[in-house]
Amino acid sequence: MVERLGPPLEEPIFDELAIIGVGLIGSSVARAARTRKAARRIVLADRSRETLARAKELALGDEVTNDLKVAVRNADCVLLCAPVGATEEIGRTIAPALKAGAIVSDVGSVKGAVLSALEPVLPSHARLVPAHPVAGTEQSGPDAGFAGLFMNRWCILTPPEGADPEAVESVRAFWEALGSHVETMGAAHHDLVLAITSHVPHLIAYNIVGTAADLEEVTRSEVIKFSAGGFRDFTRIAASDPTMWRDVFLYNKDAVLEMLGRFNEDLTALQRMIRRGDGDGLFELFTRTRAIRLGIVAEGQETAAPDFGRRGLQTDEQAP
């Protein structure tokens, strides 16, 4: 069980926060920001009227609208919580409505593409500070969010060269208020690191679940009925939002392909060990990889629970 979010801040970090996209991440930000009073006022925007209606029912913000320009006109910070592929279109839409000094940030797990999409379209008076909270579940939609999602997780900032230091510090303070540890790195380095820690594992999960489903000699009911722990874990990952992950692979393809190449080389070496009956080599590999898993748990990024600790994240206080 992770610790609860701290008490409300004495002073908000932003007077008005606009969140564009009210899915798992956007709704979790809204809940956490309200709990900590990190923003005096929260405006929610989404193209889906159904999503907005549900966000209003859940009282996630002070205002909801499907007009992006209206959503950002008074915002001190605009947080894009939409798939990476929509970044440029959203940037072009909101650009004329941004007030002087407004911070534009995001939550996408690809950063080079976000910089390339937003830097050319945002006005000079806006301050761009991309971010990536490394947190999530396989669930989606406004009901899936909870305030504790970012507790003890990392949020990576990738400000462009010459970014305003005050804006960077404000974004850092915001994510720290939501419970995150914050680190700053270059966008290209971020994309390479996330390719191996997140993107390729998701790709493998999608692929292995698809392979199992396609096996002619195994019926669909048998795949589901006899799922062992490993396959269940793969299916959890493979249940993630398809639109978001489609965009991740399209917009971080160079880093993903590089990591896939390395993975294929290692997989070939593993095949060779099995073929040769190299028990010592297999034991050494499994011992080394087990130590990495234990290190992740020791760092507090997961628990040893078989459900990946996800249920333990949501306390009664943080539940929607």
Image (cartoon, grey):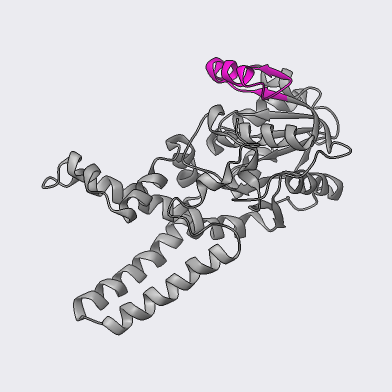
Taking the view exactly as shown, the residue that stands out farthest to the bottom is 280
Looking at the image, the residue that sits furthest to the right is 11
| Residue 3 rendering spot, x and y as whole percentages | 67, 50
**Chain part drawn in magenta:** 43-66
In the displayed structure image, the side of residue 265 where residue 192 appears, left or right: right
In front: 130, or 278? 278
Residue 284 seen anywhere in this rendered image of the structure: yes
Q: Position of residue 278 (x, y in %)?
A: 25, 82
108 and 30: which one is in front?
30
Q: Residue furthest front?
A: 316
User: Which residue is pictured at 36% across the width and 54% down the height?
Assistant: 204
Does residue 79 belong to the magenta stretch?
no
Relative to 73, does residue 188 appear above or below in the rendering?
below
Quarter that holds the C terminus? top right
In the rendered image, the vertical position of residue 260 relative to residue 135, given as above or below: below
User: How many numbered callouts?
Assistant: 0
Q: Please indicate, yes or no, whether residue 122 appears anywhere in the rendered image.
A: no
Counting from the top left corner in percent of width and height, residue 32 is at 69, 37
Q: Does residue 305 lie above or below 82 as drawn?
A: below
Q: Is residue 54 magenta?
A: yes
Q: Residue at x 74, y 20 (%)?
A: 62
Which residue does the image show at 68% across and 32% down from the upper left? 30
